[in-house]
Image: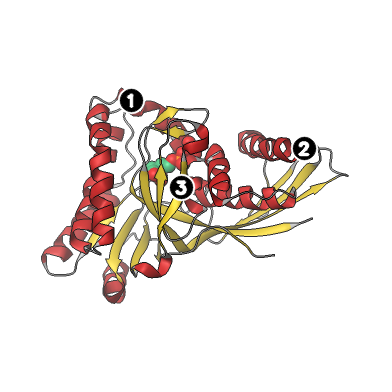
Amino acid sequence: MKVVVRAPSNIAFIKYWGKKNEKLRIPANSSISMNLSDAYTETSVEFKKILSDDLVIIDGKKIDGKEKERIGRHLNLIRKMARINFFAEVLSKNNFPKGAGIASSASGFAALTLAGVKAAGLNLSEKELSVLARLGSGSACRSIPDGFVEWKKGSKSSDSYAYSLKSPEYWDIRDIIVVVGEKSKKVGSTEGHKEATSSPFYKARISEMDKKIADIKLALKNKDFTKFGRIVEEEAINMHTVMMTSKPPLFYWLPKTLEIMQSITTWREAGLETYFTIDAGPNIHVICRSKDVRKVKTKLEKIQGVKKIIINRVSKGARIVK
Ligand code: DP6
């Protein structure tokens, strides 16, 4: 049976950086995110008797090497659970251009998980799907449930999973992705996570995480945008400080990144309330209220060097489309 799934990418407000168990992708801290309506992956999976190897095609290109091995390992987990030994045909498409600097591992592994599980004839709960997606890429576990999501760090594999805190309709905030760099990054997040503990600030970061999670959940509950935004910005700077002070240091920002961060601060001082967050790359995510989207977009369009702007609402999690 061929199953097609669409899964959103997500942006973390409280980030996952550093693992307690590298192989099982158990994070050092819990994280909070929202699913993105306009950055998603659509994947079909079919297990076929006639195949002599897994066939993986992403955005029209046949995948080999390390990327294929990682997908193969994930398919092996599904094959083991379903007790099948057929290879799979995996066809995957991102709606955002590859190399746009937008991470596809969250949406990619969430889509692969749900499509693979269904194609193998398994019926898993949302929690079990999230656990399985996490084993492919940590942040993918947050793309399974709907809307605003918390990934509970847990203490073992079976209790490290994400669940929905609030539905997509709960709060109409937006994430505007501002693409300023399109080259793929030198150090990907899986490699970066390993370096986190080498920063002298890592321990301090981790010791504050439980409080940060509690604070942002309260801001979300109260729909307190100012409090929410301040926590989000502080958190992004905090994670990037750990990155920049790791050994060797990881600098993901470009000059444009900093320029836009400063613009956002200036706009805010002038009354346009927006906040930024940044993942393991140079692109900026501008968080704003729905009423301010057009104003923010117009301002961003005037900045030279902005390559693409993607406006996201809060979205549902991974879904079967066929
Ligand atoms: C900076 O989920 O890509 O985006 O588990 O090794 O696949 P792996 O890492 P990944 O890390 C994401 C890091 C981040 C922060 C976040 O999304 O929470």
- Asked if the beta carbon under badge 1 is closer than 8 A to the nearest atom of ligand 1, the reply is no
Above or below residue 62? Residue 224 is below
What numbered label is drawn on residue 197? Answer: 1
Along the horizontal axis of the image, is 265 left or right of 209?
A: left
Image x and y of residue 131, in percent: 54, 41
Marks 2 and 1, the one that precedes in the sequence:
2
* Residue linked to disc 3: 162
Along the horizontal axis of the image, is 310 left or right of 49?
A: left
Outermost residue on the right side: it is 50
What numbered label is drawn on residue 230? Answer: none
* Residue linked to disc 2: 83
Q: Residue at x 21, y 47 (%)?
A: 234
Q: Residue at x 33, y 25 (%)?
A: 197
Above or below residue 258? Residue 64 is above
Residue placed most toward the observer, 298 or 53: 53
The quarter holding residue 285 reads bottom left
Residue placed most toward the observer, 125 or 119: 125
Q: CA distance from mark 2 to mark 3?
A: 26 Å
Marks 2 and 3, the one that precedes in the sequence:
2
Image x and y of residue 52, in percent: 84, 38
Image x and y of residue 312, in percent: 41, 66
Q: What amino acid is found at the position of numbered circle 1 in the picture? A: Thr
Q: CA distance from mark 2 to mark 1?
A: 38 Å
Q: What amino acid is found at the position of numbered circle 2 in the picture? A: Arg
Along the horizontal axis of the image, is 279 left or right of 64?
A: left
Marks 1 and 3, the one that precedes in the sequence:
3
